[in-house]
Image (cartoon, rainbow, N blue to C red):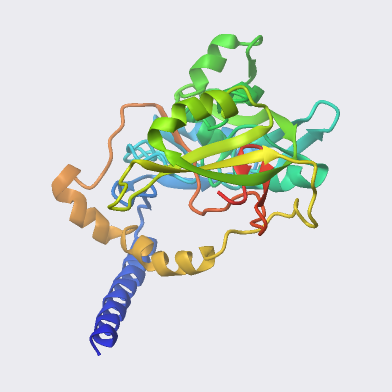
Amino acid sequence: MTVALNLSRWLLVWLVVFAAGMASGQAAGSTQTPIVNDVSRLNPVKVREVYEVHDIEEIRSVLARAQREHLKVSIAGKRHSQGQQTAYQGGLVIDMTHFSKVLHLDRHTNTITVQSGATWKEIQDYANPYGLAVQVQQASNIFTLGGSLSVNAHGRDPRYGTTIHTVRGFRLMRADGSIVQVSRTENPELFSLAIGGYGLFGVILDVDLDLTTNDVYEKQHVSMDYKEYPAFFEKHVKGNHEIGLEYAWPSIRETDFLRHLAVYEFVKTSKHPAHIYKLHEESGISRNRAAFRPFQAFGSGEISTLVLAGNHGGHAVHPLHFAQQRHASTHRVPGLRLGKGYGYLAGVFCADQ
């Protein structure tokens, strides 16, 4: 009875938030001035206009308008940089998420050229049928390529280094609409400035990335006291090229809190179970999106602006001409979760992770 009552109360709260969220979303959509927010829903900003660009000329036209009208420009993707870089009050926003085509894949050099609005998931999905994968990316593949480079995301694969180590070069559109080729040998200063530059030095258009071949790894597990782990790592993991991924989880049990470790390794194998290279969506994602969608709507319109007005005036002010951020809002791992301890390690990701 108590459980049923609590459930009813939870459903009632959810319905109230859902209704308020829908009303908030409608109010935001009906206002003349668009409101832009990042994924946190804590930084609503009223901007002049949001442009969903699809090609280079559309990007150039937005920059031309900014020059004529002396407006600031923000470059946005999935908006996961939550430090108020997403938009400038009264400025223009370039939404890059539709600028996401794969332009070329070279199977001889294992390189791919991709527009900067593409997510790592989209890159992986394209490369996978060719037996290729991204070398390094962040802990999730939900972010856009341009956003990862603009915040200088480090990635998580010690074999290849950071994400930037897999970038051969890119094209950059400057504020005046001109396009320059940027690499470690061509305009090298811009290469170091644009990476981690949050769009200050222009719009990253398309990127040349190194890929790697797909491998199959077998999941292995061992338990030990935390004091044994340093010696274990030195002897079995460090310098072992057969291990593609290794991590340890400390216990949270009261009896051995933070003392016992569950160590997981993914060791390269010649076994190839059926359909091991087929990529699948992680389970439960559609359910989670549906559950949180009303809360996102609730935080996207005028209501969130009023609530936050006491904290920072209801808007984000950033003193940059360009302020870039591109990331994603879904979660998916590029691999197949199988029984019997097998995992497909696509670049730096394993299905069992």
**Residue found farthest to the right:** 108
Q: How many marks?
A: 0
Q: Position of residue 127 (x, y in %)?
A: 75, 42
Name the foreground residue: 14 vs 174: 14
Judging depth in this view, the residue of 255 and 35 nearest the camera is: 255
Place residue 54 in its image quadrant: top right
Image-based side of 108 in relation to 215, left or right: right
- Residue placed at 51% from the left, 46% from the top? 51
Residue 133: x %, y % from top left = 71, 39
Q: Between residue 147 and residue 98, name the one nearer to us.
A: 147
Q: Residue at x 37, y 60 (%)?
A: 296
Q: Determine whether, in the image, residue 50 is placed left or right of residue 242.
A: left
Q: Residue 132's image quarter?
A: top right
Would you say residue 61 is visible in this rendering? Answer: no
The x, y position of residue 68, in whole percent, is: 45, 30
Residue 151: image location, x then y, percent? 46, 30
Q: Residue furthest bottom?
A: 1
Q: From this view, report whether residue 317 is shown above or below residue 352.
A: above
Q: Which quarter of the rendering shows the N terminus?
A: bottom left
Tell me, yes or no, if residue 197 can be seen here. Answer: yes
Q: Quadrant of residue 311?
A: top left
Please name the residue shown 24% across and 54% down the image: 305
Q: Which residue is at the far left?
A: 310
- In the image, what residue occupies the spot 39% across and 40% down? 86
Is residue 25 positioned above or below 179 on the image? Answer: below
